[in-house]
Image (spheres, rainbow, N blue to C red):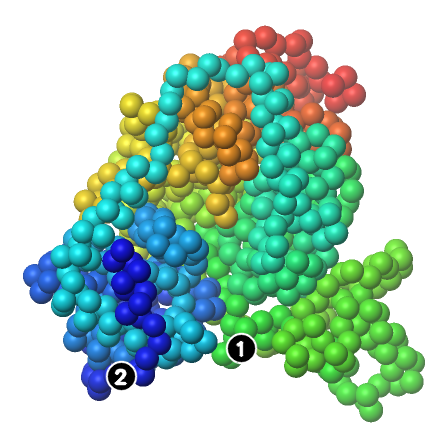
Amino acid sequence: MLLATLAMLLMPQDAHANDGQSANHLIHETSPYLLQHAHNPVDWYPWGPEALERAKAENKVIFLSIGYSACHWCHVMEHESFENVEIAAYLNANYICIKVDREERPDLDDLYMQAVQKMTGSGGWPMTVFLTPELKPFYGGTYFPPESRYGRPGFSDIIHRIVDAWGSQSDEIIKSADALADSLQFQMQGDGDCEWPTATDLVALEKKWVGSWGSIYDPTWGGFGAAPKFPAGNALRWMMTSGGAPGQEMAFHTLRKMATGGMYDQLGGGFARYSTDEKWLIPHFEKMLYDQGTLVPAYLDAWRITGDEFYARIARETCDYLLRERRVAEGGFRASTDADSEGEEGLFFVWNPTTIRDALLPRGDDALSKEEQEDLEADLELALRAYGVDDHGNFEHDGNSALTRWSALDAQEESELKGIRQRLLDARNLRVHPGDDDKVLTAWNGLAISALAQAGRMLGDARYTEAAQDAARFLMKHARDQNGRYSRSWRKGKAQHTAVLEDYAYLARGLLDLFQSTGDESWLDEAQSIATIILKEFGDEETHIFWDTDGTDKTLLHRLKSPWDGAIPSPNAVAVESLVMLHAFTQNDKWLQAAHKNLSALMPMFQNNPRGFAATLRALKLAVDEPAVAVVIGTGDDSSLRGWAQRLYAPGQPLRLVVMRAKENAALKLGLFANRTALDGKATLYLCRGKTCQAPVNDPAQL
């Protein structure tokens, strides 16, 4: 009833505002997003004791704004409302204003996003939430224009009318907020009594899962559901490995359509956050580290299964983008790049015939000989045709285009396009670059480490493996304390915010991929240390499903559990997958027992609603099938492993856990592989499943 009353109160009326001055508390933060707001006239506080205690002491509503630096509409709302001195003055006089970077505090973001979705039926960023002094939400939404328009309440109206409602109906607001807060507390309860599935049960689950995705599949353009379309890298991987022919058809088609549309950066590599249309043509141009970390493995899987070099090329180009543009000193990876530059969305990335001509003809037509002029005109024609650029444009009616690769080229043209692509990229790099969020997030770096380690061993490129190791060393040096606990975020020499489950889970998975790529047991040891922390700090003996947080932050209304996939794989599922892998490597039963309990508790959820549980089903399949582990012991020279790598990762080979170790006669301490070495001076393969091993072989042809 109260929400309906507030909705009536917030219907558009004339806006009012007062003069005021800003006094900002974000100036000492490290988050680029928070620092972007440090000079707003709004008296922003970071989330913390000072702001929360003041709200209680003054009995004021908390205005909570959550966003991130690459968010286009966050910038729009900042410019329209938070830089407006009249709106700011009213906020400062009547609210405690708190600004949160969702990437630093995913726990707060998840909690209050669930509240907004319950209140409005949708969510997004910027997230706008109004809380009681007890931190309980009672009204919220996403972007609001500064003034009322098109039947939508303006932000100025909202803040005035909420103050009026708080003054006259606070008891009713508190009652409604209490009920909403209580509903957030019981998001997931595990059963724990389900029988462990058989291989037959798993096949039935796989078919049900593929069918649920198939019901929303776009057979023309690939992807799932209507626009906007998001890259479902995690689901696509599961479709390829366990979805049978229907799943593979959906996955391969979607991966190709994404990589040939404007969704993919055709010059620099890497994927944008999402496509605004069903064709993957016009992206929302922000680039997130986690998308690269989830899509590279998907394209590697597609290449491994099909042998189609197209998929390997996309994986390579995306890895090269990470190494070229996203690293900080010492090796960590930066979080994101903005969609905007020079105040315009996509300006850095779009082209028209004139700008392409200028890039390809830098000296001007008059400075060229006739032969040079003809060659460059031919290059221009090829570039326009290959990248789908014409005078009409495809982006926002200004003649500019997002580049695509929809046109088929012959082998000679593809070869010529490589040089053209580099020249266009060089020219683009002279433009004003989009904003860059250079904080290093443990979770997202874990995804990047995993992707690069997989790319290094599957594509045979040591640069990727070394970059993954550099990032892991960076986190262990800068984000880990003396007790082995990690921080969520690092920037400019300062690590802060307590790591959450996704930080530990994704990093453990990345370290296990590094162990497979290098055979260096220090990565395995650290993964086991992290797994121990997960079980101790995030475990729940009652339901066996991991908490999202470690419970140390008492300002959170509730500890949540989020076992379903979102833009990134479920951290609960990735943690479980890592436990299964640890058992396969070490034969320590405690890891598998914890994984079994967790998966059994989740069975009712993904049986009833399988679509959101791709990562969980992948972990379940790994546990049910009992993965084969192939360990290759080299003779001290990486070249001794190349033949095995080519064989083990050849298209069509079954998926195994593979450990490549180059050190000559260096015995592993690893479970069934303890004390085994290279035989007869040749790299030697040991292959085991569970407690059963085959005879060692030192000829790749014998696999």
Q: Which of the pair 337/231 is nearer the observer?
A: 231
The residue carrying mark 2 is 16
Q: Amino acid at mark 1?
A: Glu
Q: Which of the pair 505/540 is nearer the observer?
A: 540
Give residue 344's mark: 1
Q: Is residue 619 left or right of residue 404?
A: left
- The numbered mark, 2 or 1, whose residue comes first in the sequence reads 2
Tell me if I can see residue 585 in this picture: no
Residue 260, x across and y down, in percent? 72, 57
Q: Amino acid at mark 2?
A: His
The residue shown at (42%, 14%) is 589
Tell me if I can see residue 408 in this picture: yes
Q: Quadrant of residue 663?
A: top right
Q: Which of the pair 453/536 is nearer the observer?
A: 536
In what element is the residue under mark 2?
Answer: loop
Answer few, some or many: residues within 10 Å of disc 2's Cα (few below 14, many 20 plus, some between 14 and 19).
Answer: few
Answer few, some or many: residues within 10 Å of disc 1's Cα (few below 14, many 20 plus, some between 14 and 19).
Answer: few
Question: Please, is residue 171 above or below residue 636 in the view?
Answer: below
- Report the quarter where the C terminus lies: top right
Question: Please, is residue 581 above or below residue 217 in the view?
Answer: above
Question: Please, is residue 196 above or below residue 179 in the view?
Answer: above
The residue shown at (46%, 38%) is 564
Q: Quadrant of residue 437?
A: bottom left
The residue shown at (46%, 64%) is 70
Question: Please, is residue 483 above or below residue 385 in the view?
Answer: above
Give residue 225's mark: none
Q: Is residue 323 left or right of residue 478?
A: right
Q: Quadrant of residue 404?
A: bottom right
